Amino acid sequence: MLRIAVPNKGALSQGATDILTEAGYRQRRSSRDLQSLDADNGVEFFYLRPGDIATYVASGDLDLGITGRDLAVNSGAEVDEVLALGFGRSTFRYAARPGDVDSVAGLDGKRIATSYPGVVRRDLEAHGVKTEIVKLAGAVENAIALGVADAIADVVETGTTLKQAGLAVFGDPIMHSEAVIVRKTAADAGQAPERAVEQLLRRLRGVLVARSYVMLAYDVRAELLEAAVELTPGIESPTVSPLHREGWVAVQSMTERADLHRVMDALYDLGARGILASNIDASRL
C-alpha cells in the first residue's frame, strides 16, 4: 500500500486534491477527514499540515508527499524532489528600504526578517553571507519600520505591498517555488512499492501534459500540408487522413494550449478550415 501525504489546508490543498482526482485517485469526502483509502489503486492518503509533510516523508513513515518546494527546503528534511506539479507558484525575494541595502553581499552583518528561515539560511550560506535571521509568523513587511530588522525575505507577487511599505526588492530571486512531489533521499530510500510510485508519477505527468496541450483538428488542401505541419508538429508527428473531398486532408495534432490561438490564426491564414480545439482529459506519452 502506497502512503502519500497531502496538504490538509492552505493554498496547496485544493490544487493537490484536483490533480490527484484528475489522475484517477479517490480523495476524502470531507475537509475534516484526516485519512482516505483508495483500495482500488492501492493508495492511502494522509492529510497533514503542508509544512510538516517533508518531515514525515523523510522519516520514512510516508512514501511520498505533496508540498511546496519552499516548505520542503524550509523544513530542512532530507527529501528529494521527484516531480514539479505546476501549481502553487511563488517567488521569494529580498527587500529593504531603497539605499539601505542593494545587494545580497550588503546583507552581511544585517538582520533579516522572514517566515522562511530555512530557505533564507540556505541562500545566504550559498553566497557566503552571515546575518542574523529574525523568524516572524507573518506580515514581515512591517519588520523594518518597527526596528526589528534591516531587510526582509518574503514571497513577492506584484510588489505592491512592498512599495506601500516603502521597500524595494534587490538581488536575484532567492527561490522559485511551486507544489512538488517529494520522497525520502535516494541514499536512504525506504521500502516504497516502486511499481505504485511509478504509476502515480506516470499518471500525474499525464495530467500535466493534458493541462498544457489541446488536440487541434483541421482540414487543409494537400499541397499546403507541409506548411500546416510546420505550425502543428505535434508531440511526435500529426495524424493525417485523406478526406472524401479530393485534394484535401484532415489533420490532428497536439498543440500547446498557451500558443493555441496564434496557431489557429496562422492555420486559417494559410487556408485551413474546420479548425477545432478539444481539451485532453488524460494522456500517456
Image (tube, rainbow, N blue to C red):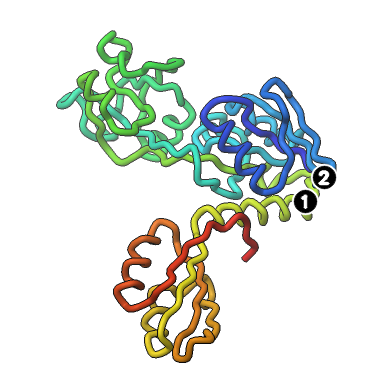
Badge 1 element: helix
Which comes sooner in the sequence, label 1 or label 2?
A: 2
Q: Quadrant of residue 54?
A: top right
- How many tags in the picture? 2
Residue drawn 43% across the image and 88% down it: 222
Distance between the alpha carbons at the discs numbered 1 and 2:
8 Å
Residue drawn 41% across the image and 85% down it: 221
Q: Quadrant of the N terminus?
A: top right
Residue 143 versus residue 267: which sits nearer the camera?
Answer: 267
Picture coordinates of residue 177 (x, y %)? 46, 39
Q: Can residue 78 be seen? A: no
Residue 182 versus residue 260: which sits nearer the camera?
Answer: 260
| Disc on res. 2 | none
- How packed is label 1: few (under 14 Cα within 10 Å), some, or many (20 or more)? some
Amino acid type, label 1:
Ala
Write down the residue under mark 1: 196
In the rendered view, does 148 fall on the left or right side of 248? left
Write down the residue under mark 2: 42
Picture coordinates of residue 269 (x, y %)? 29, 74
Picture coordinates of residue 266 (x, y %)? 32, 71
